[in-house]
Image: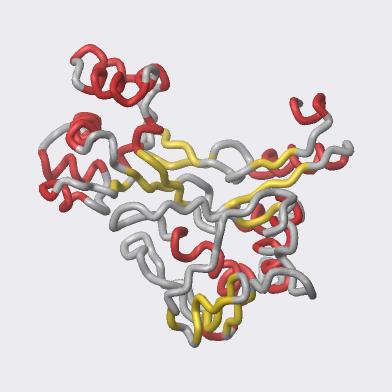
Amino acid sequence: EIAKIANLPLHLTHYYQKMMYVHSKNIANGRHTDYLGLVENAIESGMDVTFDCYTYAYSGTTLTIILPNWSKDGGPEKLMQHLQSTNSRKKIAKEINKTFPTTWLTNFKKPHNKKYDGLSVNEIAEMRNQEPVTVLLDLLVDENLGISFVGLGGNPQTLPEFVKHPAGMIASDSILFGDHPSPRTFGTFTKIISEYARDDQFLTLENGIRKMSSFPAQRLGLKNKGLILNNYDADVIVFDLPKVNVPATKANPRQLSEGIEQVIVNGQFVIKDSEHTGNLPGKAIRRGRDS
C-alpha cells in the first residue's frame, strides 16, 4: 500500500513462504499462492513489483533477532542487563520466538563453547542438563551476544515456485560466520545451475542465469553490469554444466561449489582453471554510477 500511494517501485527481499514452529513441529505459514498472489495482483494493477528469494529453505542471522524487541531497546548494553536480570529473563522466556529449540548455533568465540558449534539448542541443553531457553540466554551472555544461528525458515516444498516466478530473482543473504553457517553461503547460486535448472528443470538455464545477473543488475540500476556486451564490465563465469555440483550441506556447509572453471571480475581472473588466483578486483558500486 505504501508503494502504491507513493507511486514507487517495490522490491520484496528474502521473499518466500515462511515456516512456523507449532506444537513441536514446523508447519507452513499460510499458502504460498497467497504470497505470490500479492505480487501478481500488484503487478496486474500496474505497480512495479519484484522480489528476491533464497535457493535454500534455511535462514540464518544473529541470534538476538529472536529476542523480544523491548529487550533490545537501549542497545547491546541494555540487552546484556536484561539477560542477567531474573525478572527480565522470565519475561523473555515467555515471549521469545518459539522456533529456537531446533535452530543450530554457530560463531562461538570462547574456546570452552566451541564444542557447541553446529548443534541445536535442544542438543546443547541435553549436554548441559538445562532448559533450552536457559541455555540460549546463558550462552548469549557468555559470548557477549556474538552467537549466530541457522534454522529452517522457508518451506522447501514451495520454494521452487518462488525461484521460478517471473518477478523473482536470486539472493544469498549469506553471512560468513562460524564453523557451521547456512549452506546457502557456499551454494546459493550454483544450486540454481545444478539443481533448479539442470536436474529438476524448474526453469531454463538461461532464465536461471538471468535471475542471477542481468535481472538484479537492471533492477538495482547497476550500470555496465549483468550482460556480456561491448563496453560492459568483464564479469564472466565459465562452468562445465555436467560437473557443476553443490556439496555444501547442513552438516558440512563450508564446501566450495564444483564445476566452476573460470571466474572473471572486472576483467581479472579470480578463479582460473578452478583455482583461486588471489586477485581481489571486486569493489562496491552504487546505483546509476559507472563502476
The x and y percentages for residue 244 are 53, 79
At x 53% / y 83%, what residue is drawn?
261
Along the line of sight, the residue nearer the viewer: 35 or 82: 82
The answer to whether 236 is drawn above or below residue 6 in the figure is below
Q: On the picture, is 45 further left or further right than 146?
A: right
The quarter holding residue 78 reads top left
The x and y percentages for residue 164 are 69, 59
The x and y percentages for residue 230 are 79, 75
The answer to whether 190 is drawn above or below residue 88 in the figure is below
At x 20% / y 31%, what residue is drawn?
141
Total labels: the figure holds 0
The answer to whether 238 is drawn above or below residue 192 in the figure is below
At x 38% / y 64%, what residue is drawn?
249
Judge whether residue 93 can be spotted in this image: no
At x 52% / y 79%, what residue is drawn?
260
Judge whether residue 120 can be spotted in this image: yes
Q: Seen from this angle, which residue lies furthest front?
A: 290
Along the line of sight, the residue nearer the viewer: 79 or 58: 79
The quarter holding residue 128 reads top left
The answer to whether 264 is drawn above or below residue 39 in the figure is below
Q: On the picture, is 236 further left or further right than 290?
A: left
Q: Tell me the quadrant of the picture where the C terminus can be found.
A: bottom right
Q: Tell me the quadrant of the picture where the N terminus can be found.
A: top right
